[in-house]
Amino acid sequence: MVARHGSPLLVLDPAVAVASYRELQAQLPGVQLHYAVKALDHPRVLAALAGAGARFDVASTAEAELLEGLGVAGDRLVWTNPVATRAERAAAAAQGVRLFVVDNEVELLKLLDLPEGCRALVRLAHSDRRAAVDLSGKFGADATTARRLVATAVDRGVRVAGVSYHVGSQMDAVEPFVEALASALALVEEVEARHGIRMDVLDVGGGFPVSYGSPATPLARITAALRPVLAALDGRMTVIAEPGRAVVAEAGTAVTRVVSTAERPDGLWAYLDDGLYGSWSNVLTEHVQPLVLGAAELAGAPLAGPVTIAGPTCCGLDVIARGWPMPRLQVGDVVVSPTMGAYTSVTASRFNGRPPAAVVVLDAVPCA
């Protein structure tokens, strides 16, 4: 593949994304899965997921328009970014989006400008240090603020469909998923009784973890804990989820080559043609450590010792891994990282004028 396409590469397999989507759907029957486009927005992957019946979570006009160009109707989307301009919300509504997440009064009242039928999902904060990235510092309303938002909505005529929350990115524990769900349902019951309204949508967010080499909480354990609580709703609410990483992480593999090596005071360094400002941006933004494997290692070569693996830019922070066991590396050797589908190409930059890795998409996507 490198001989044909060069390097660096990001190799995507839409069939893997579809299989992951279907596995999660099987474990959460009755839940509408809205794939989070922000995790990986490649059109071939989105088209494959759309063909498998997925709905979508969008956070920008660009994401919504990308799906529109693929023939995905707006009523299959939910706008989950709590911060948006009036123009962005209006464009989404014109496209057919009807559910908009908000977490403050400014954003709530923007919905008054939208057509009838557009409704709010009040995002609740749920902070937990076990998440790789705790999103509730920036987003989400505490219980007091959420009560006030619902009261304002009732007073001003904004229709509230329900509530949403996000336990945090790469949440590696079962309990936060259960605790957040229980808190959300308790708040729904309280505000319904207080205001005489009926909420019919519950958005349980994402945060489902994947393994980057070290063990992660199995998806089956999380979904097994959620299913009985969701089943007890007995269809009273439409339940939606926003998986991103759990759908596409395993659908991507980074392929790079060694461009230089150096013996430094702390040992051997190997410099690749991609790094933290490219595909391995997830190390910075997502606080994950993907596996880094020499192609020779995959072919059975023994490990030679610890190596510091760095990217090609002039930034001293551009270090992918330190003390990483690798086979003996030489210039031109191929190095790969699996589980690189999520938050890699979408957060890559052009620092030092280096373009992001070229994308190669594998064929044979099952649609039935």
Image (cartoon, grey):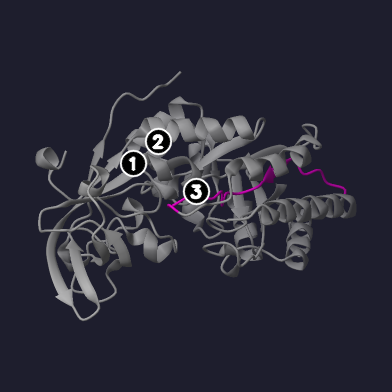
Identify the residue at the far bottom of this view: 265
Q: Position of residue 247 (x, y in %)?
A: 47, 40
Asked whether the beta carbons under mark 2 and mark 1 sit within 8 Å of each other, the answer is yes
Q: Secondary structure at mark 2?
A: helix
Which of the 4 image quarters holds residue 239? top right
Segment colored magenta:
196-213
Neighbourhood count class around disc 1 (C-alpha, 10 Å): few under 14, some 14–19, many 20 upward: some
Check residue 147 in the rendering and tell me which mark sits there, or answer none: none
Determine the residue positioned at 62% across, 57% down. Answer: 167
Q: Position of residue 174 (x, y in %)?
A: 66, 52
Q: What kind of secondary structure does the magenta stretch mostly adopt?
A: loop
> What amino acid is labelled 1 in the image?
His
- Residue 42: which numbered mark, if any? 1
Q: Which residue is mark 3?
A: 210
Residue 123 drawn above or below residue 161: below
Q: Is residue 347 magenta?
A: no
